[in-house]
Amino acid sequence: MSDVYDALISPRPYRHVSYENRAACEELTAMAEKGKIKVEVVQALIAHDRKSKPHHSECVLSKEKRSSPPPVNFYGVIDEKADACSSLK
């Protein structure tokens, strides 16, 4: 999960702006809700990020979205022309 968090908050060639911390945590929370990563691991990250440093089991993950991903994010976008050409090979 730490590699996913790092990828979200670090510069990447497919987007002009990195995720803000809150948006990255919300993305990880959404992944945990879908069962892609463990909820307890996300709770630990968010608990560590909080000023009061509560135990991770006391950390409640908010379902409220107060941030948004970067506006221009080309991750996973397929160039239809390039995709069509590669299928002809």
Image: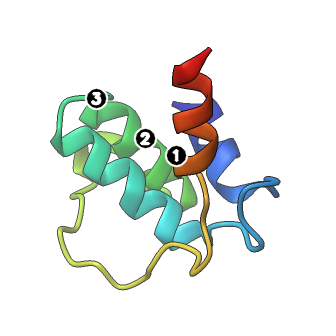
Q: Position of residue 9 (x, y in %)?
A: 69, 58
Mark 3: secondary structure: loop
Residue type of the residue flagged with mark 2:
Ala
**Which mark identifies residue 76?**
1
The residue lying at 71 percent from left, 64 percent from top is: 15
Apparent side of residue 27 relative to residue 22 in the rendered image (left or right)? left
Q: Residues within 10 Å of mark 2 (few under 14, many from 20)?
A: some
Q: Is residue 51 above or below residue 65?
A: above
Q: Residues within 10 Å of mark 1 (few under 14, many from 20)?
A: few
The mark closer to the camera, 1 or 2, is 1
Q: Position of residue 28 (x, y in %)?
A: 40, 48
The mark closer to the camera, 3 or 2, is 3
Q: Nearer the viewer, residue 88 or 72?
A: 88
Q: Residues within 10 Å of mark 3 (few under 14, many from 20)?
A: few
The residue to which callout 2 is attached is 44
Could you tell which of marks 1 and 2 lies nearer the N-terminus?
Answer: 2
The residue to which callout 3 is attached is 36
Could you tell which of marks 3 and 2 lies nearer the N-terminus?
Answer: 3
- Whether pointer 3 and pointer 1 mark residues with C-beta atoms closer than 8 Å, the reply is no
